[in-house]
Amino acid sequence: MTDISRSRAWLESLRPKTLPLAFAAIIVGTTLAWQ
C-alpha cells in the first residue's frame, strides 16, 4: 500500500462532514494541553 492510497483511504473513511469536528477536537485538545 502506498502512502497516497493509505491517506486517500483515511480521507474517504473520515467523511467530509466529520472533518470540522475532528479539527475542532484537535484544536481544543492542543489548547488545553498548552495551558
Image (tube, rainbow, N blue to C red):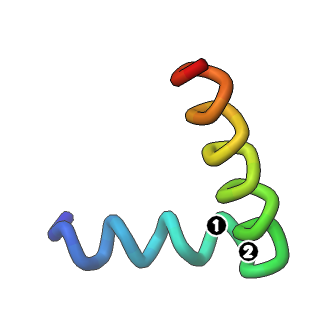
Q: Nearer the viewer, residue 16 or 9?
A: 16
The residue sitting at 80% across, 59% down in the picture is: 21
Q: Quadrant of residue 35?
A: top right
Q: Amino acid at mark 1?
A: Ser
| Total labels drawn | 2
Disc sitting over residue 13 in the figure: 1
Residue 22 image position (x, y, % from top left): 71, 55
The residue sitting at 42% across, 77% down in the picture is: 8
Disc sitting over residue 28 in the figure: none
Residue 20 image position (x, y, % from top left): 76, 69
Q: Quadrant of residue 16?
A: bottom right
The residue sitting at 30% across, 76% down in the picture is: 5
Q: What residue does disc 2 label?
A: 15
Residue 4 image position (x, y, % from top left): 24, 77
Q: Residues within 10 Å of mark 1 (few under 14, many from 20)?
A: few
Residue 9 image position (x, y, % from top left): 47, 70
Q: Secondary structure at mark 2?
A: loop
